[in-house]
Image (cartoon, grey):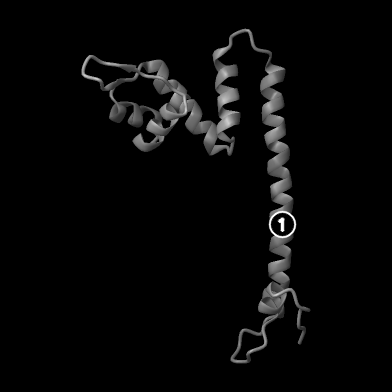
Amino acid sequence: MNIGDVSRVSGLPTKTIRYYEDIGLVNPARGANGYRDFSEQDGHKLAFLGRSRSLGFSIEECRTLLSLYEDRDRASADVKDVAARHLERIAQKIEELEAMKSTLETLVTRCHGDDRPDCPILNDLAGGEVVTA
């Protein structure tokens, strides 16, 4: 398959496929003309990487997961460990986002949004006291 074909099969843009090749995640064969010649297995790897990235795994985590995917003697505990650590980071990020949301909701509620110059949102961003009305 050429890069356009594998792009359609994997759902990844050609630019991403070239990047994954540059960093060694996939290594397609080269034809006599020098063009990339992706195998069906390359297409599966790229789809795997696309799905992994869509779940928020980092490139290095994807590299680890791909290595585990290709290792038929792997222990599923190793895969679970990578996913569990990622899940913990997601949970932490959700907590941080919820705190941000709560703060912004409070600030937006306290801001009159009228023609007056005083603004609790700007006061908070500047590190000052939140002005209440």
Q: Residue furthest bottom?
A: 116
Q: Which residue is mark 1?
A: 98
Q: Quadrant of residue 30?
A: top left
Residue beneath the point at 58% across and 11% down: 71
Numbered disc total: 1
Q: Image quadrant for the C terminus?
A: bottom right
Residue at image coords 60%, 24%: 64
Image: 98 above or below 91: below
Residue 119 is left or right of residue 131, and the answer is left
Left or right? Give the position of 69 relative to 99.
left
Q: Secondary structure at mark 1?
A: helix
Task: Give the percent coordinates (x, y) of residue 6.
Answer: 34, 26
- Kindly identify the amino acid type of the residue bearing the numbered disc 1: Glu
Q: Quadrant of residue 112?
A: bottom right
Determine whether 111 is above or below 100 in the image.
Answer: below
Q: Look at the image and tell me in which quarter the N terminus lies.
A: top left
Instruction: Name the image quarter holding residue 4.
Output: top left
Which residue sits at x=65%, y=12%? 74
The residue nearer to you, when weighing 124 against 96, is 124
Q: Is residue 121 left or right of residue 20?
A: right
Residue 32 percent coordinates (x, y)? 22, 14
Q: Residue furthest top?
A: 73
Residue 48 image offset from top left, x and y in percent: 49, 26
Q: Is residue 41 above or below residue 10?
A: above
114 left or right of 101? left
Residue 101: x and y in percent read 69, 62
| Mark 1 nearby-residue class (10 Å; few <14, some 14–19, many ≥20) | few
